[in-house]
DNA sequence: CGTCCACGTCTAC
DNA sequence: TAGACCTGGACGG
């Protein structure tokens, strides 16, 4: 679940599921977790959640019932406690009956009812973390979704920092400035802005002001100022509130929140909606490269001047739908067909010294055919070319480009 | 079976 | 700028 939208959706989930629920007793940590114990226990308490960028904060609030003295005597806490979570690559919250505890439920809050229910922080890979009595991590910037004005000012006033000398696709993952943006969002944001991923961030951001027409306050203000304001420009402004990069860092993640599903969560019954929403990340026909941190960047067209000259594009696999997925929240369960998104394979070849033949012979062979030919592709480029050709098999048949054929609904 | 890949930080050389 | 930290799913042999 882990980019800004998923963290926020997780906070909504907790608030919805735990509304009116009384919890009781200590907070239990799994044996295997290396995260800190949570020194909190109460006869009766409630749980609420809030999110900021890529963090979620749970607030445990004791309900006044007995005399304070009695509670103290029983070793109970009488003041609220905040616990700040980071989800790593696989964290999420789940509220279940006690006998349906998910595997990897590393921190658990038990309800007071008879057959009790449990709010669990589930995290298979255990890259997630929590901090009892925690605060929003000071080194992280304002939330791109819900503190837009501050987020924008923070970036605009620091564009001359060394951090912005890096390629824009890498800077977008810097949580000091882009709290909430992750790997799929950076791809979707850059794709929509038509900015090559490996252009210096400074270059694309300098010149942007602290305000833009994205403010709800006067949406069309800037627009009217624009001298020319060709019909086309006007149309773009109105359609996309303004599509400068910083604005997209706000609107794109909010689109995911508004899809109403769970965001990036292949096991979810709503995953097809998210999949259909993606325009670049994991989309057939897009190119991929490893950035300087080894992360895969998905993009279309020109990689930009700062592209790693050595990186190979990783080969992705498909996304298969977990058939089983019993997902509460259901509501809609139509469309059950196979969702597997076919992955293309390498795009950019990466220069690599062609002089020395030899290496990866088989590899080069296949690359030969469906390869590159378009290091350019400035932008327009309708996603039509059946570039996929690729290996004999596949055939990609028809220009299915848009994997995920908008099933039902 | 083994290899590669994944929504992210962290800290250590 | 590398690893380290983890589990599990897809794919290849």
Image: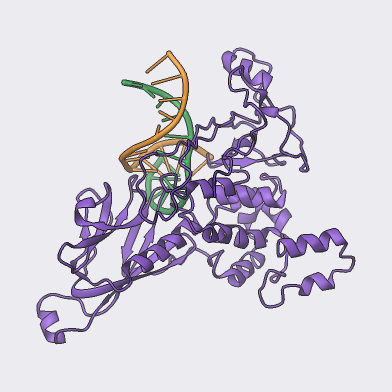
Chain colours: A purple, B green, C orange
- In the rendered image, which quarter is residue C9 located in? top left
Compared across the picture, whether A18 is left or right of A367 comes to: left
Q: Is residue A25 left or right of residue A274?
A: left
Q: Nearer the viewer, residue A307 or C6?
A: C6
From the top left corner, tell me how far across and down residue A166 is, in percent: 63, 49
Residue A87 percent coordinates (x, y): 39, 54
Question: Does the image show residue A372?
Answer: yes
Instruction: Report whether A255 appears left or right of A138.
Output: right
Q: Residue at x 64, y 22 (%)?
A: A390
Q: Measured along the vertical axis of the image, is residue A269 above or below residue A142?
A: above
Q: Residue at x 74, y 31 (%)?
A: A374
Q: Residue at x 10, y 76 (%)?
A: A74
Q: Is residue A108 above or below residue A75?
A: above
Residue A251 placed where, x, y %? 62, 61
**Looking at this rendering, what residue extends furthest in the right direction?**
A228
| Position of residue A364 measured from the top left corner of the image (x, y, whole percent) | 62, 18
Residue at image x 36%, y 50%?
A327
Q: Quadrant of residue A391?
A: top right
Q: How many marks?
A: 0
Q: Can residue A166 be seen in the rendering of this structure?
A: no
A23 left or right, relative to A202: left
């Amino acid at each position: 679940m882990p980019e800004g939208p998923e963290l926020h959706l997780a906070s909504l989930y907790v608030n919805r599921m735990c509304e009116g629920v009384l919890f009781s007793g200590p907070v239990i940590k799994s044996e295997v977790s290396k995260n800190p114990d949570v020194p909190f226990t109460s006869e009766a308490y409630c749980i609420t959640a809030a999110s900021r960028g890529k963090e979620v904060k749970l607030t445990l609030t004791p309900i006044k019932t007995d005399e304070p003295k009695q509670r103290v005597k029983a070793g109970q806490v009488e003041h609220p406690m905040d616990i700040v979570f980071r989800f790593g690559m696989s964290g999420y919250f789940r509220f279940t009956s006690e006998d349906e505890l998910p595997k990897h439920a590393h921190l658990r809050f038990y309800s007071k009812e008879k057959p009790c229910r449990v709010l669990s922080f589930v995290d298979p890979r255990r890259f997630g973390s929590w901090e009892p009595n925690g605060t929003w991590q000071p080194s992280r910037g304002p939330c791109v979704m819900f503190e837009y004005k501050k987020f924008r000012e923070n970036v605009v006033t620091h564009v001359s920092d060394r951090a912005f000398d890096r390629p824009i696709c890498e800077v977008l993952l810097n949580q000091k400035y882009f709290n909430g943006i992750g790997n799929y969002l950076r791809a979707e944001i850059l794709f929509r802005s038509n900015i090559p991923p490996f252009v210096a961030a400074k270059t694309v951001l300098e010149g942007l002001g602290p305000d833009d027409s994205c403010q709800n306050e006067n949406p069309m203000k800037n627009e009217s100022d624009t001298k020319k304001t060709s019909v086309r420009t006007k149309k773009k402004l109105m359609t996309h509130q303004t599509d400068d990069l910083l604005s997209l860092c706000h609107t794109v993640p909010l689109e995911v929140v508004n899809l109403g599903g769970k965001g990036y969560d292949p096991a979810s019954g709503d995953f097809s909606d998210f999949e259909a929403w993606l325009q670049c990340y994991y989309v057939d026909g897009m190119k991929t490269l490893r950035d300087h941190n080894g992360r895969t960047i998905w993009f279309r067209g020109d990689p930009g001047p700062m592209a790693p000259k050595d990186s190979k594009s990783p080969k992705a696999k498909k996304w298969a739908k977990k058939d089983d997925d019993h997902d509460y929240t259901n509501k809609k369960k139509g469309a059950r067909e196979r969702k597997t998104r076919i992955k293309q394979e390498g795009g950019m070849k990466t220069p690599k010294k062609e002089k020395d033949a030899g290496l990866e012979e088989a590899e080069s062979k296949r690359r030969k055919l469906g390869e590159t030919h378009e290091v350019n592709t400035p932008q327009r480029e309708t996603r039509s070319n059946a570039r996929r050709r690729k290996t004999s098999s596949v055939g990609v048949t028809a220009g299915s480009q848009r994997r995920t054929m908008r099933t039902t609904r």
